[in-house]
Image (cartoon, rainbow, N blue to C red):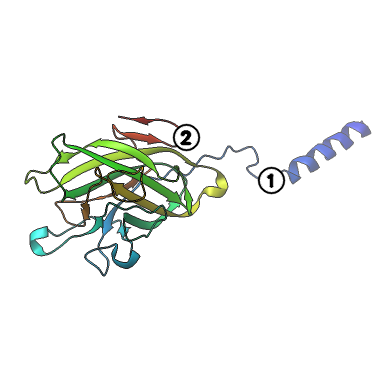
């Protein structure tokens, strides 16, 4: 009887030192958040390497009211975000991150594209780490022309980003970099283009949805193949 009581006392002690919730299974904090790119101090965001950012409030003014801004996407490219050649949007997202969806609007200022396709390289950095290779993920998009024909829209998703652990449930710096045209050469080539990415008007509401409920038809899978 004394042995039984000793065993019960030892068991009670063991249970008492087990941390509360030790048997709970942790689930990633995949909160969905939509942000829209906003204008800063400059109408042309990449002057002298400036970058644009985002806000949770959607655009409320029209281009006819003087709203909107953009960035010049030159034939040159540079890998790092915040350079003067490519479009860069930089901001913060809090929580785990495994996917995102992007909507972008482009004004093509080079020779007309008969095919209606838009070639671009997508680069995504999370806390300074690129999720794709040095030149990004090169994609041929089916651009959707606006009703005026002055701009065109592309949408795509990035999946399997992989910041889903408990320690990664924190604030992350996100850099999205877009380079339109040829990406296989560091200098301009015959196939390079000049265009302008535009945002922050009700006509061109460019932005990002973090951890969207559904993905777009074009999906760039980190560590996998592009679909769509």
Q: Residue beneath label 2, please?
A: 223
Q: Residues within 10 Å of mark 2 (few under 14, many from 20)?
A: few
Which residue is at 33% across, 51% downward? Answer: 187
Element on which disc 2 rests: loop
Q: Position of residue 195 (x, y in %)?
A: 21, 51
Residue identified by numbered label 1: 19
179 vs 44: above or below: above
Q: Secondary structure at mark 1?
A: loop
Q: Quadrant of residue 218?
A: top left
Residue sitting farthest toward the front: 190
132, 16: nearer the viewer: 132
Apparent side of residue 35 relative to residue 149 in the rendered image (left or right): right
Gap between marks 2 and 1 measured at Cα: 37 Å
Quarter occupied by residue 98: top left
Q: Is residue 208 left or right of residue 2?
A: left
| 186 over 160 or under it: above or below | below
């Amino acid at each position: 009887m004394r042995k039984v009581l000793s065993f019960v006392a030892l068991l009670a002690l063991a249970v008492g030192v087990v941390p509360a919730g030790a048997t709970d299974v942790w689930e990633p904090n995949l909160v969905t958040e939509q942000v829209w790119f906003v204008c800063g101090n400059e109408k042309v965001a990449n002057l002298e390497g400036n970058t644009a950012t985002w806000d949770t409030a959607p655009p409320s003014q029209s281009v006819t009211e003087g709203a909107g801004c953009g960035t010049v996407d030159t034939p040159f490219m540079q890998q790092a975000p915040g350079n003067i050649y490519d479009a860069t949007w930089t901001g913060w997202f809090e929580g785990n991150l495994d996917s995102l969806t992007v909507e972008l609007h482009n004004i093509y200022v080079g020779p007309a594209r008969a095919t209606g396709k838009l070639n671009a390289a997508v680069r995504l950095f999370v806390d300074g780490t690129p999720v794709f290779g040095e030149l990004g993920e090169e994609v041929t998009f089916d651009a959707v022309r606006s009703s005026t024909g002055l701009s065109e829209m592309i949408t795509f998703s990035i999946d399997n980003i992989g910041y889903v652990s408990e320690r990664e449930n924190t604030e992350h710096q996100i850099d999205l970099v877009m380079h339109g045209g040829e990406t296989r050469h560091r200098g301009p080539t015959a196939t390079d283009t000049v265009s302008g990415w535009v945002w922050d008007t009700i006509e061109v509401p460019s932005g990002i949805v973090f951890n969207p409920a559904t993905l777009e038809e074009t999906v760039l899978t980190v560590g996998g193949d592009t679909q769509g």
